[in-house]
Amino acid sequence: MLFFSPFIPKSILFHNSSSTMAKSQNPFKFLVLSLSLLLPLSSAAFSPSDDHLVACGATAAAALDDHRVFLPDSECHTAHIRSYGPRVAVSNAGGLTPLHQTARVFTRPASYQFVIKEKGTHIVRLHFYPFSSSEYDLSSALFHVAAGEFSLLANFSTKVPVLKEFIIPIDSDKISLTFIPAQDSSFAFVNAIEIISAPKDLIGQIATLIKPNQTEKFNGLSSQSFETIYRLNIGGKKITPFNDSLWRTWLTEQESSVKFTDSESKTELFTGRINYLKFGASREVAPDSVYDSARLITDSNQNLSWAFNLSPNDKYLVRLHFCDIASLALDELYFNIYINGNLGKQDFDLSQAVNRLATPYYIDYITNTDNSGLLNIIINPSNFSEPNWVQGLLNGLEVFKMNKTERGMDEEIPVAFLMVRRGIGEFVKSVLCGFVVAGLLVGLVVLGMRWRTESRGNLGWSEMEFVEGKLGREYQMVPKFEI
Ligand SMILES: *[C@@H]1O[C@H](CO)[C@@H](O)[C@H](O)[C@H]1NC(C)=O
Ligand SMILES: *[C@@H]1O[C@H](CO)[C@@H](O)[C@H](O)[C@H]1NC(C)=O
Ligand SMILES: *[C@@H]1O[C@H](CO)[C@@H](O)[C@H](O)[C@H]1NC(C)=O
Ligand SMILES: *[C@@H]1O[C@H](CO)[C@@H](O)[C@H](O)[C@H]1NC(C)=O
Ligand SMILES: *[C@@H]1O[C@H](CO)[C@@H](O)[C@H](O)[C@H]1NC(C)=O
């Protein structure tokens, strides 16, 4: 029984029998309490305390279809850039969405700094749309990306649009995202950045570790880092950021490269209300549209399987989302779950886990792949199943790669590049952002030129003016000793 189980005190599951006193004393209060336990939550959209949405290289705010607005990185209130060299804004008028239309190119290491209001798990999304501008063909970029001193991407390059999503713990009040060209001759780019606080329950503490022929409890999930590799709405439609509580995209099985054996199996679409339990998986863990569709086993000789091709030397977090939208009654659904041929759960009883139909539940597994990099998930009927019952189902499936070392998702990036310099840069920023009188600005320029001369040859972070093209040059404001 080593699966992640949302905390549901017995007194809540069985409130009808245990709350008779409350009922007799104050029937209204009892009613409110009962209703609140089945919180529909629909109106209360998640509002993250940290919510940095940056359109890199943009000159104006970029409004997306999902109602989010990405602010340009040349504006003071969004992000603070430090760079060793020039940072060029490039644009592509033909881009499909506003975020496809601009990018920031760095030929030397550069970093964005963000203020973190609330420590804890954050979602970091990096948008890469490799268009070709007159100056740069972004598909030939080759670079590393780090969050603080933790490496996210090493030797990264892409010829197709990609959205990289990471879920990482941040326990400082600032985070810098650093872009480092992999070689002297290469460059880095990024089109957009999202850093948002994750809901508290997105990553729990406990998962089930799959080992050959046994499972173990894995404790400390929330201190790990993850990269999202697959996010699938099983048996349903594609879900876009517009319709997701955390602005995620859930692909269908057909749209992704997953191999699933029984594409002929029955799918179920549910039009009733999904019951999010107050102490169970919330709508932020996965939205209604994940839970209101599923693929089903309706025949005892049938099994459902999904196979992913992954890199063989990594560990993965596999999150299986369940919601019984198909059974006619409680206690009529039992199935087995196999991860790479190992029994993850025998005779799994969703009714026992949540005690209601149409109620979300998920299980987190940590697993390796097989030697060839294959990750295989099979659901098959339990020996408890009866012929006229639904004999297995799955609503959603996520696969996250876990950090390979303490310092990074993959390879480590040389630490020398990741030092966060502090000092006068902050002051300069506040002055420039405040649009202080011209005299002071001129004074700073002169001061800056002096510093530049003095620090020539030093690898100090430079501060560039914040309004593109206005001062038209770069000033070395931060001497090396301020590391
Ligand atoms: C959002 O979901 C609704 C209901 O499923 C659907 O009709 C609509 O097309 C979706 N919108 C987007 C932008 O995906
Ligand atoms: C799944 O079904 C196939 C045939 O459809 C069968 O060969 C295989 O043994 C089954 N696997 C499990 C784990 O039930
Ligand atoms: C189901 O029952 C068969 C026969 O009793 C047994 O061999 C098998 O191990 C059982 N399988 C599971 C997953 O419980
Ligand atoms: C991933 O990071 C966590 C937190 O730093 C660390 O405890 C864990 O050992 C790392 N994983 C590996 C495989 O090094
Ligand atoms: C990038 O790739 C080169 C050549 O394959 C390798 O030598 C280097 O260690 C890699 N750098 C990182 C940070 O992974």
Image: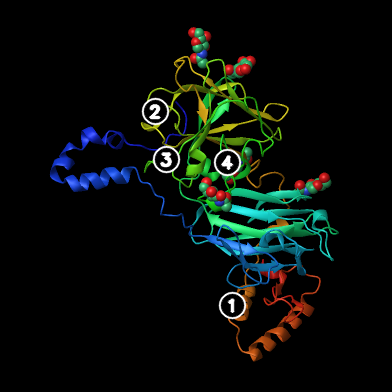
Q: Amino acid at mark 4?
A: Lys
Q: Earlier in the sequence, mark 1 or mark 2?
A: 2
The total number of labels drawn is: 4
Mark 4 and mark 1: Cα distance apart in space: 47 Å
Coloration mode: rainbow
Quadrant for the N terminus, please: top left
Mark 1 and mark 2: Cα distance apart in space: 57 Å
Residue position for label 3: 274
Mark 2 and mark 3: Cα distance apart in space: 15 Å
Name the quadrant containing residue 451.
Answer: bottom right
Q: Nearer the viewer, mark 1 or mark 3?
A: 3
Picture residue at 66% right of the left edge, 36% below the top: 254
Residue position for label 4: 237
Q: Amino acid at mark 2?
A: Ser
Residue position for label 2: 351
- In x, y percent, where is residue 125? 62, 53
Quadrant for the C terminus, please: bottom right
Q: Nearer the viewer, mark 4 or mark 2?
A: 4
Identify whether 166 is placed above or below 90.
above
Q: Nearer the viewer, mark 3 or mark 4?
A: 4
In front: 290, or 109? 290
Residue position for label 1: 430
Q: Circle 4 — which element?
A: loop
Q: Earlier in the sequence, mark 4 or mark 2?
A: 4
Identify whether 124 is placed above or below 262.
below
Q: Nearer the viewer, mark 4 or mark 1?
A: 4
